[in-house]
Amino acid sequence: MTQSTSDPVSEKSLAKPDALARRTRLREFQAQLLERMQAARTGASPYARQLGVLIGQRYCLLNLQEAGEIISVGAITAVPLTQDWFLGLTNVRGSLVSVIDLARFQGQAGTSIDRESRVVVFAPGLSFNSGILVSRVLGLRNVDDMRPHENEAEATASWAVRQYVDRDAQVWTELDLSLIVQDAQFLHVGL
């Protein structure tokens, strides 16, 4: 019987540097994003205080003072007898945080969870242990580089406060998380 020419140990050791390099690049990106977010919060940055995210198929802007941590989607425990947009609870550093699929809440198709999906936890200042599921985090955006959108009829919710168009003609909707947590429908998660 002949032995296979493929050595699983060697294959694993060859794959490790690539995975290690990806983790290093991801950590560097996260550190740079954190630095930029902190600078934007203190006003020491040329960037406006907006975080660009993709919610379903909609490009949205979140005020950095209202957005807290950005975490990978981990285990979410479903809660029975709740709305389909209330995904459940997750543990964030020892605190239970409710996870909301805002796309589904707005009547769109549910957000599929993949490796780029994140949960944007509400800032502690909102006193609301919740987070919204986003398809992707797109980084910081400067609304000074955008123009107001002429057809703001698309922003129908009271917490979708205004819309902008960037240089690529992409429409961005600015969300006010402090208004979302006051929305009666948002607060009523039970069936």
Image (tube, rainbow, N blue to C red):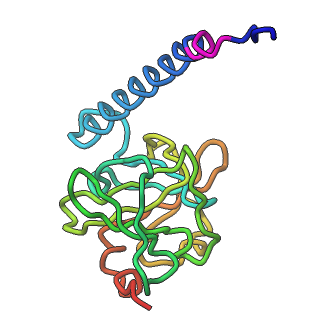
Query: Measuring 50% from the left and 75% from the top, which residue is drawn there?
Result: 85
16 horizontally vs 182: left or right: right
80 horizontally vs 15: left or right: left
Specify the segment rendered in magenta. Answer: 7-12
Measured from the top left, where is residue 24 in percent x and y? Answer: 43, 20
Q: Quadrant of the N terminus?
A: top right
In this view, the residue farthest toward the bottom is 191
**Residue nearest the observer in this picture, 9 or 80:** 9
Measured from the top left, where is residue 17 in percent x and y? Answer: 52, 13
Rendering quarter of residue 80: bottom left
Rendering quarter of residue 186: bottom left
In this view, the residue farthest toward the front is 1
Query: Measuring 40% from the left and 70% from the top, which residue is drawn there?
Result: 88
Measured from the top left, where is residue 152 in percent x and y? Answer: 57, 70
Task: Find out whether residue 67 is within the magenta segment.
Answer: no
Q: How many numbered discs?
A: 0
**Residue nearest the observer in this picture, 37 or 10:** 10
In this view, the residue farthest toward the right is 1
**Residue nearest the observer in this picture, 141 or 34:** 34
Query: Measuring 40% from the left and 67% from the top, which residue is drawn there?
Result: 77
Magenta span: helix, strand or loop, mainly?
Answer: helix
Q: Quadrant of the C terminus?
A: bottom left
Rendering quarter of residue 121: bottom left
Task: Find out whether residue 10 is within the magenta segment.
Answer: yes
123 shown above or below 23: below
Query: Measuring 47% from the left and 65% from the top, which residue is drawn there?
Result: 162
Measured from the top left, where is residue 142 in percent x and y? Answer: 44, 42
**Residue nearest the observer in this picture, 185 or 50:** 185
